[in-house]
Structure formats: structure tokens, C-alpha cells
């Protein structure tokens, strides 16, 4: 029986260009990982690590956020980037700004 050799760990120099390629034309994580024959969990880890290290551009345009009144009540729904949050009442603008800031990390 043959022993399999573990592949050497890859660092930032390996993952940075892959993450940049993914960011340029995003697709599903699983599809990207399969295309490059990399572990999807490891790819996701590096994606999130490298995204967190990137400073936000100074003149970045805020992402569009849809806020709609809930049917039959005074609540609202906030939808952005595939995430939907429902509130019983419209939160303060400062709270929403902080929430969106944290969600973008």
C-alpha cells in the first residue's frame, strides 16, 4: 500500500491571484474551486482572509440596498447581496449604516 504525500501548504502568494481572478468574474465557490482543482473550504478561507485585509477604496460607491415596507404592518425588509433582513419597525439610519458596513467585510 502506497502512502500519499501531503501537498505543501500554499500561502498568500498562491492564493492572492486566485482570489483576484474570482473577484473579477465571480461564480459559485464550488464551481471556481473545481475548475482550479482546489479545496473549496480552503479557497473560502483564503477568500475571506484576503477580502478582510483589503482596505475599502476611499471613493467607493455604496452598494444599492433595497428597503421596502412590510405588507400589512409598519415593518420593513432590507435586501442586499442575497441577504434579506426583516425588521418590525424601520431602524435608525446609523444602525443600518453600521450593519451594512459590517456585512460588507
Image (cartoon, helix red, strand yellow):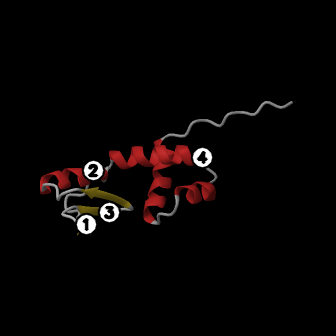
Mark earlier in primary sequence (3, 4): 4
Mark earlier in primary sequence (4, 1): 4
Q: CA distance from mark 4 to mark 1?
A: 41 Å
Image x and y of residue 83, in percent: 36, 58
Q: CA distance from mark 3 to mark 2?
A: 21 Å
Q: Which residue carries the number 3 mark? A: 80
Contact check, label 3 and label 4, Cβ < 8 Å: no
Q: Using the image as rendered, state which of residue 34 and residue 89 is in the foreground.
A: 89
Say what secondary structure mark 4 lies in.
Answer: loop
Q: Using the image as rendered, state which of residue 74 and residue 100 is in the foreground.
A: 74
Q: Residues within 10 Å of mark 2 (few under 14, many from 20)?
A: few
Say what secondary structure mark 3 lies in.
Answer: strand
Q: CA distance from mark 4 to mark 2?
A: 26 Å
Q: CA distance from mark 3 to mark 1?
A: 16 Å
Identify which residue is drawn at 18% across, 63% down: 74
Residue 93: name its quadrant: bottom left
Contact check, label 3 and label 1, Cβ < 8 Å: no
Image x and y of residue 45, in percent: 47, 43
Q: Name the disc covering residue 70, or none.
A: 1
Q: Which residue carries the number 2 mark? A: 55
Q: Which residue carries the number 4 mark? A: 39
Q: Residues within 10 Å of mark 3 (few under 14, many from 20)?
A: some
Name above or below for residue 91 compared with residue 1. Answer: below
Mark earlier in primary sequence (3, 2): 2
Q: Using the image as rendered, state which of residue 51 and residue 88 is in the foreground.
A: 88
Q: CA distance from mark 1 to mark 2?
A: 35 Å
Q: Residues within 10 Å of mark 1 (few under 14, many from 20)?
A: some
Amino acid at each position: 500500500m502506497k502512502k500519499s504525500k501531503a501537498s505543501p501548504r500554499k500561502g498568500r502568494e498562491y492564493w492572492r491571484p486566485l482570489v483576484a481572478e474570482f473577484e473579477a468574474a465571480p461564480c459559485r465557490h464550488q464551481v471556481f474551486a473545481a475548475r482550479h482543482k482546489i479545496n473549496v473550504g480552503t479557497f473560502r478561507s483564503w477568500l475571506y482572509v484576503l477580502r478582510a485585509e483589503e482596505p475599502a477604496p476611499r471613493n467607493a460607491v455604496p452598494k444599492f440596498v433595497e428597503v421596502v415596507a412590510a405588507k400589512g404592518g409598519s415593518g420593513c425588509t432590507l435586501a442586499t447581496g442575497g441577504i434579506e433582513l426583516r425588521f418590525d419597525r424601520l431602524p435608525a439610519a446609523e444602525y443600518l449604516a453600521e450593519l451594512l458596513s459590517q456585512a460588507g467585510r
